[in-house]
Image: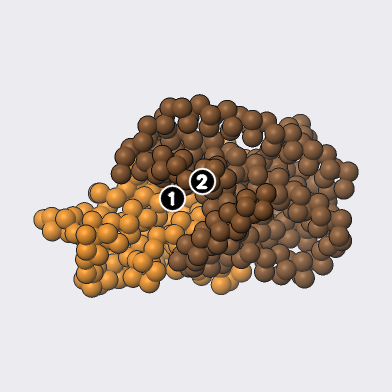
Amino acid sequence: MVWLLYSAIAVINSFIAITIIYNVSAGISGWSYYQMLLLAASTNIVMGVSAIFASNGGWAIITKMRSGGIDPYLVRPYTTLAVMLSNFGDVEQLSAVAGGLIMFAYAALNLRISLASFLIFAVLFSLGLSVFVMFTMMITIVVYYIFKSGHFLFELNDIISNAGRYPLKVYPLLGQVVFSLLLPIGIASYYPSAAMLSEASPVGVAEVAIVSVLLFWISHRLFYSLMKKYTSGGG
Amino acid sequence: MFRSVEKAEALLAIGIKSSLAYRLDYLFFFCFRIIFALLMLFVWSAIYFASNTQSIAGISQQQMYAYYFLVGVMFSIMTISPSDQLQSDIRSGGVAIAFTRPINYAFQLFFYSLSVDLLYMIISIPLLVITAFFVALKLSLATLVLLAIEMAIGYALSSLISFMIGSLAVYLTETGGIMVVTWNIALLLAGGIMPLSLFPPLVSHVLLLLPFQMFIYTPVSTLLGTMTSAEAAKEIAVGSVWAIILFAVASLMWYRIRKSITSAGG
């Protein structure tokens, strides 16, 4: 129950932060209050869905790997990815998703979004969400191999979540590249939102879709190649 | 009194040695505080640019940048160590063994937790130095004295709140969630998301009467010079009153819990 509240707090915090920013200033150029709320809501939904499959950004997986507790799961007659996605998540993060959906609906109702734009968003968002979940699984394994500790993931999750609430264009080029290709919250949240709100061209939409598929494939390959090298932590 | 100091030193030394087994955590803490501050620097640059102004709610652009770097420094005050340790001791039965030792358990808990958090505070010093250098903070003796008092009261308040939540482990199976929820709410109320002066005036006034402002907003504002000495003194008084109240509540809770603790054995 408490964790339900915890995951809703991120949504509440972002709503309050954006509301205060637009109360005391002109906000961010090119982005109205409701557009910002919609972007933040998209990010919260992405983070919530990701956490449903990999609790605390993968902390639960790393904890199991360190103790060897993941071994019984790996001998099951399912793919490694399927096993991990289905066993180490946090269903209570549904509250973050629900909160994000409510904020999204509230923002969308105050914006004039055409059906075509929304469909483009839905497609790109679905692709981006898949990329982000796959990225979460992949980075969990990478972090395990490098640090053997999950603390890094807590902080990384926070940074990604905070960065994704604002338009990528506020960051310098390096930041935009990092949050698009290396930590793909931009692919999952910003580009779909921007495509919907600014009536993106078919070429732009296709580019984002192709990059999404590529990033998914890369994360997927890296995940499995690292898992092949996994040796039990014992216990 | 000297024996108490010796005990405190011993506990601090043990805690620091134990914490240094996880050196990477401190490095991550430092790096991610800088990254978070940089993210907010870019966001607020865009906001100031769009607003075409040098000051928002009385805060200049440079002060706003410095604010978020200093938030990273003050983050070390918000401790969860007493809650973690107390919950662990209650669940394992270690608290019963601790009562047999010639050291008051609360005393032991406080100094052990302080040893863990001291390393976070030490690792935050470079961040303070970097910020002071780039923003040209005017660090007078009076400012440093006020800052030291505010940080001490802030740490005492966060320790007491953490202790009270940890004590609930006697009645609940898990208090980690309550701790995380409380601290996430506290971060907002303490000005960790944005300065309290940006909130609507009535809300800001209420927030300055709560204990959380001593964690981040008041120390940072003192450093930045956006809070006068008189205002800082007022907030210190508010924080002190809360410290007395929370100490009394925590003492009462602990008195009742001592009577009802049943060890989990082991």
Q: Judge from the rendering whether residue B221 lies leftward or rightward of residue A42; answer left or right.
A: right
> Residue B126's x, y, as percent?
67, 69
Task: Please determine whether, in this image, residue A49 is positioned above or below residue B262.
Answer: below
> Residue B175's x, y, as percent?
44, 38
Residue at (86, 60) in percent of width and height: B141
Residue at (70, 34) in percent of width and height: B244
Residues marked 1 and 2 touching at CB (< 8 Å):
no
Q: Nearer the viewer, residue B257 or A193?
A: B257
Mark 2 surroundings: few (<14), some (14-19) or many (≥20) residues within 10 A: few
Same subunit: marks 1 and 2? no
Colour of the chain lettered B: brown
Chain ID for label 1? A
> Label 2 is placed on what type of residue?
Pro
Q: Judge from the rendering whether residue B153 lies leftward or rightward of residue A31; answer left or right.
A: right
| Element marked by disc 2 | loop
Residue at (37, 32) in percent of width and height: B262
Q: Label 1 vs label 2: CA separation?
A: 48 Å
Quadrant occupied by the N terminus of chain A? top left
Mark 1 surroundings: few (<14), some (14-19) or many (≥20) residues within 10 A: many
Chain ID for label 2? B
Quadrant occupied by the C terminus of chain A? bottom left
Task: Please determine whether, in this image, residue A5 is positioned above or below residue B107.
Answer: above
Q: Judge from the rendering whether residue A200 lies leftward or rightward of residue A25; answer left or right.
A: left
Instruction: Read off the residue under disc 1.
Output: A47
Q: Nearer the viewer, residue A207 or A186?
A: A186
> Residue A109's x, y, as percent?
53, 35
Please say whether residue A30 is visible from this viewpoint.
no
Residue at (37, 59) in percent of width and height: A136
Instruction: Read off the residue under disc 2.
Output: B102
